[in-house]
Structures are given as C-alpha cells and as structure tokens.
Image (spheres, grey):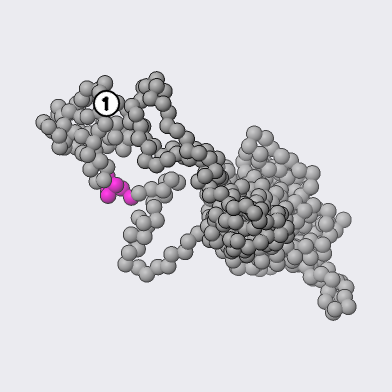
Amino acid sequence: MPQLGETVAEGRITQWFKSAGDPIAPGDNLFEIETDKVSMEVPSTATGVLAEIRVPAGEVVPVGAVVAVIADRTDRAKPASAAVAPIAPASPLLRSMAGLAPFATTQPVTWSATATRLDPFFEVRTPARNYGPARVAGGAAVTPLARRLAAEAGIDLSQLRGSGPHGRIRARDVQGGRTALARAVPALTARGEPAAEQIKALYRDVPFEELPLDTMRSAIARRLTAAKQTVPHYYLNADVAIVRLLELREAANAAATVGADGKPAFKLSVNDLLIKAWAAALKRVPDANAVWAGDRILRFRYCDIGVAVAIEGGLLAPVIRRAESKSLSVISNEMKDLTARARARKLDPAEYQGGSSTISNLGMYGVREFAAIINPPQATMLAIGAARRQAVERADGAVAFANMMSVTLSCDHRVIDGAVGAQLLAAFRSTVEQPVAMLV
C-alpha cells in the first residue's frame, strides 16, 4: 500500500484491475485505492505475473502493507504463513527463572509478512500454590484467582455468594458477577463511547438504516474528535461591513475581458475576495501565521490559505499557496479548478496538505454565524456567515441600512494569545471594509 501523503495512514482498495495469474508490465494499473482525501489508481513498477492478491476489494489496509505479490513468470508466490518459521516457546529453564508456570499456546506464534510486532497467542498462568485463601467481610474465603479477577473487573467481593465448600468464592462466582455487571452497565468502546449494539437497542422499535463508515468519514471523526479534545480553542466574533467589498467585486467582474470563446477571463465570487483578505490579514499579523508542532511553533513567511469544500460524504480543504501575493483573478481561477477536482477526488496530496489557516464559509446556506473546529496542526480557522441587511448607526448619528456579515475566528491558545487573535480579526475586518488595500 503506497504512501499518498504525510498524514495518510491507511486506504481502502475499491477495485482490482488485474486478477491472479495475469501478466503485469510496468505502468499497468493494478488497483484503485480510496483514502480520506482522494481516490487514485496504483500502477505496477515491475514486470511479471500477479501471483497472489492478499487483500480483496473493499478492505482497508495500512500504508506499507503487502496487498499483492508480483512474481517472475517462472516463480510461484509463497504463502504469507511460510515467510517466517514459527517462534518456539521459551524453554522451561527461562520460564522457571521468570517465576512463571508453563504456559499453553492456543495456536502457533508467527510473524506475518506485514506485521510490525509479534502477536502473542498465549496466556501466562501464575502459580496459586504460594497463596493461602484470603477472606472478605463476613468471613468467606476467596481463592487467589477469584481475588485477582475481581480486582481487574472492579467487583466488590463482599457482594458475592460463594459456590465453593463453606461458601468459598471461586473464579466462576466472580465471572457470574461480571456478567451481571455487564447487563447493568452498557458496553463501551475503546474511546469510552457506548457500543453500537447498545445504541441500536435503544431504537429497536424504530425503523433505521445502518450506514457503515467509509475511509473519509472515519478519518473526519477521528481527527475532529482529537482536535476538539486536545486543542484549547477560544473564539472571537465580529460583524463586518461588506458594502465596499461587494462594490469592488461588481466593478472587477464588469471589467473582465471576454475571450474568443465568449467567456470572461474571470468571475470573482465573494469567497475569492475573502481568501485574499484573510491572507492580507495574516500578512499584517505575522505572529498569527503559525501552526503548532508539538514542542515548538512554526511561523511562516507566506500565507497558504485552505478553503473548506463540501464533497459527497465529507469535506476537503484545498490550499491556495502564497495567496497574499496572488491577484484576485488568479485566486478565483485556481479556486474553481481545485474545487472541481476536490469534488471528483482527484487532488494530489500536496494540494490539500499543509496550509497556515483555513476558511469555512456557510453563508450560502443561510447560516448567520457558527464556530468551526480547528484543523490541526493549524492554529486558526475563520468561519464566515451569511450577508444580511442590517440597520447601523453612522458617524453623524443617523441610522442607515448596510450589508453586514458575521465572522467567527477559532484560535489555538497554545499558539495565539487573545490579544494577537483580536489583532488578526481586526486586520481582516479592516481589509474587508477597505478592500482597495488588497489591490496595492
């Protein structure tokens, strides 16, 4: 499985273009993979025969895993299980030195061809002969194994009734208590969430459709959960007058030259101007043009602006590189191309990775304002709401109606203190309200 980007850890094989036994030449497409960002065909770099397909279509595979074997036309593929001989159990002497009783293996311990660590299919049993039976409140005896199992399960032994001689509490009694506890408390996943079966049980009388998570939705859930739990967000909100911004857009579009095909050279959207304004604001407040890098902060000379694009099943954020130095027409045409290829999942990893900040605009859906979750390792994200007509007080005390827009800036407090965040938002507001500054 090839590496398709620094942050890509796995991919789903959606289809195979070759079958086992087919001849292979360099450049032949072998299979198609889908990551959380893109869908891409993977070509062969070798000549031979596709001897074995180890991962069928539909399965998710980690980067670096062996998904197939291309053999010389005269060779035969070797099964994965024969790649390495089974590892022999430790000698009785070593086991006695460790103070452990002989262990039982339920199946052979082997290294798989793609394994990165040993999977131990055995259990180690500690001898009970050195321990006398302990007792709990009430005088009931407890076997050592029962005491250990109860401690691991968090079960109060005083609440159990022993089934052994003279009421002794044995392992089976603890296991029965564990079963009763499981019935009373919903099972949890590794993330501490209720398991799927527990959730489904709540809706047993309600018709529903189960939608398995694809690679993109799984990655979004994983990344945004981690971001919300680990990034100390704070939020700044402002209302911005966009009267002059709209006037600039109208004048620029009217002045666009028409080509031989009858189409204008460009057609600016409000979002194009906001990308340029956000890059200009980051340029004016360089302390905010930075990301979190674990034990340090990375501050950038250029302003690379990601723009959230809704696609089927999720979203991508293609990046406009060096947006502060590009003209509005270049930003507009580049954004149209990136958006089209993002929705077709044809972006290269370099076109959506990195970026010093991201814009998310839900104004076209009528959303007045919202707060976005930061996309790590970035330290800022600008959420843009819908334009509206609003009564405002003028400098002379009169009241007039103006086109206004609410924006919310999400900041990572590890990188950007409140004062710096406020300066950044003020710089953006100033640029939008005086947009001619973007042209010089």
| 72 relative to 113, above or below | below
Q: In this view, does 365 lie to the left or right of 340?
A: left
Residue 140: give x, y in percent of width and height. 15, 29
Q: Position of residue 222 (x, y in %)?
A: 53, 50
Disc 1: CA contacts within 10 A as few (<14), some (14-19) or many (>=20): few
Q: Where is residue 353 in the image (x, y as percent from the top left)?
A: 69, 51
**126 vs 122: above or below:** above
Range covered by the magenta-colored residues: 181-186
Q: In which quarter of the image is residue 141?
A: top left
Q: Residue at x 39, y 52 (%)?
A: 195
Please tell me which residue is depicted at 76% across the width and 43% down the height of the picture. Answer: 300
Which one is nearer the viewer's eye here, 193 or 211? Answer: 211
Apparent side of residue 106 relative to residue 280 in the rendered image (left or right) = left
**Percent coordinates x, y for residue 330 in the rendering:** 82, 62
Task: Find out whether residue 184 is within the magenta segment.
Answer: yes
Residue visible at 85% across and 79% down? 262
